[in-house]
Amino acid sequence: MTPDDSTSPDTQAESGSSEAELIAVRREKLAKLRELGVDPFGERFETDTSPAELRDDFSDERPVRIAGRLFTIRDMGKSIFFVIGDVHGRIQGYLNKKGVSEQDWEVWHLLDRGDWIGIEGTTFTTGKGEPTVKVESLQVLSKSLRPMPDKWHGVADREIKYRKRHLDLMANPASADLFVLRSRILAEIRSFFHERGFLEVETPMLQDVAGGAAARPFETHHNALNMPLTLRIAPELYLKRLLVGGFPKVFELNRNFRNEGISRRHNPEFTMLEAYWAYADFEKMAELVEELVCSLAEKFFGTLQIEHRNEEGEVIRTLDLSRPWKRRPYRDLVREAAGEDWFELDADQRRTRAEQDFNLEIGADLEDYEVTQQVFEKLVEEHTFDPCYVTHVDSKLIPLAKLNAEDPGVIDVYELIINGQEISPGYSELNDPDVQRARFEEQSGGETQEIDHDFVETLEHGMPPAGGIGIGIDRLIMLLTGAPTIRDVILFPQLKRKD
């Protein structure tokens, strides 16, 4: 087998080799490595830097020990250039037959793109100005038995991107960069709240009563306790218990689960930030969210002008996050979209207008306030792109927020809309236990078994007035990065099982 054949599976692929044939070749190399006394799946390898760190802080004549996956190999006979790296970055390596032991040279020719190796060597800069490591010794860390995606085209099929994220990450640097960025954004969010005196807490994911949101839960059963449980749809009621217990500022970055539809904006398992601040209100929480989002945009992107592109890379919209953000009452926005007389119509007239004038499908079981909400979502929310706090929504929509003192038909809340979707709700939290019980009973239609009586009892011990927020983290990442679908920002989105 020639050096070109042994180090360039791309050449084999281009000549028409099937995946099965490529795997067979790699297994032959696996066996030969073992014959040489080399462990193809490596042992501990001490590194003193990483490919990305070395490239960022590069200097010549520096001894280094680094490790990474082999991404490209250019065989020139007795000299070989290659690239190794990981999701953080890559760097070039150089191997010369005279510069390594005979065994290392033989081992090298049993390697392929996709293998993980550790190298020890000295840095230099090529004549073309490329930072490079001249290899003095190498160690096999993991032999890849399946070929990598094509190095020129990567993983273009979206189904494969989501179903086999490992291939997407190794073949598409932009995807890897996005998920590294997501991790850094989450760390910055934590830092933001810690700096303002909030304590991070953890609350149950298995709950006896699914509360804190209007959503269908996933149901399970605990065998030892012989009782039904649900995966949480929101942590709100437990976080409020902590306010009662004396925590003045708390937040949780949590996983929520809702047994509902899947779309480009919805995944049944998603990440949510919830925070509660004693003695604050929804206005104070709006200021907090505005400061958070703008600080993230400026820190990670250096601008408040966020471009969103389509799959062809064309800019379709530029969001302007410049402060202050607009605040508009819910009813004013509905009147502007549906007619100044909307709230003067009776329920049947509103339903008729929604169906006939706005072509909305209004289910027969929808309450009147839900018809108005449907109109709001289709005519207002979906067409609101720059940030807008929609305030004082109908009291029936949210049973956990304070009624407005001047108009008890609305509640003291905001819904932050950016890029046609809700990013964050914020409340002045309801802390009157009698009103809370009545609101729960109204929402449940009198079904007392659906009411979290323990939570109402907790409120009877006294919860301070407070402001609370939720932020959909996946949607926030979509907003900041311009990703067109939630599946692009979740490492392993939920997919239908493949037959």
Image: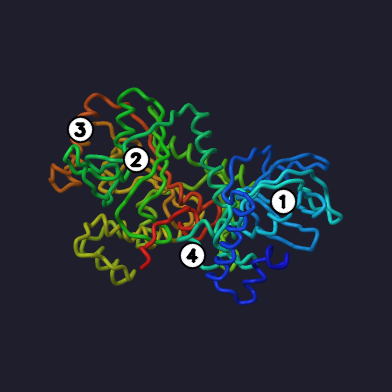
On the image, the x and y values in percent for residue 262 come to 36, 60
Q: Is residue 112 above or below residue 140?
A: below
Q: Residue at x 29, y 27 (%)?
A: 463
Please report contact status of discs 3 and 1: CB closer than 8 Å, yes or no: no
- Of labels 3 and 4, earlier in sequence is 4
Q: CA distance from mark 3 to mark 4?
A: 46 Å
* Amino acid identity at mark 4: Ile
Q: How is the image coloured?
A: rainbow
Q: Residues within 10 Å of mark 4 (few under 14, many from 20)?
A: few
* Amino acid identity at mark 1: Asp
Is residue 337 shown to the viewer in this render?
no
Q: CA distance from mark 2 to mark 3?
A: 25 Å
* Amino acid identity at mark 2: Asp
* Amino acid identity at mark 3: Asp
Residue tagged 3: 454
Residue tagged 1: 104
Q: Tell which tag, 3 or 4, sits nearer the viewer.
A: 4
The local secondary structure at tag 4 comes to: helix
- Of labels 4 and 1, earlier in sequence is 1
Residue tagged 2: 412
Q: Tell which tag, 3 or 1, sits nearer the viewer.
A: 1
Tag of residue 160: 4
Relative depth, front residue between 227 and 328: 227
Relative depth, front residue between 8 and 356: 8
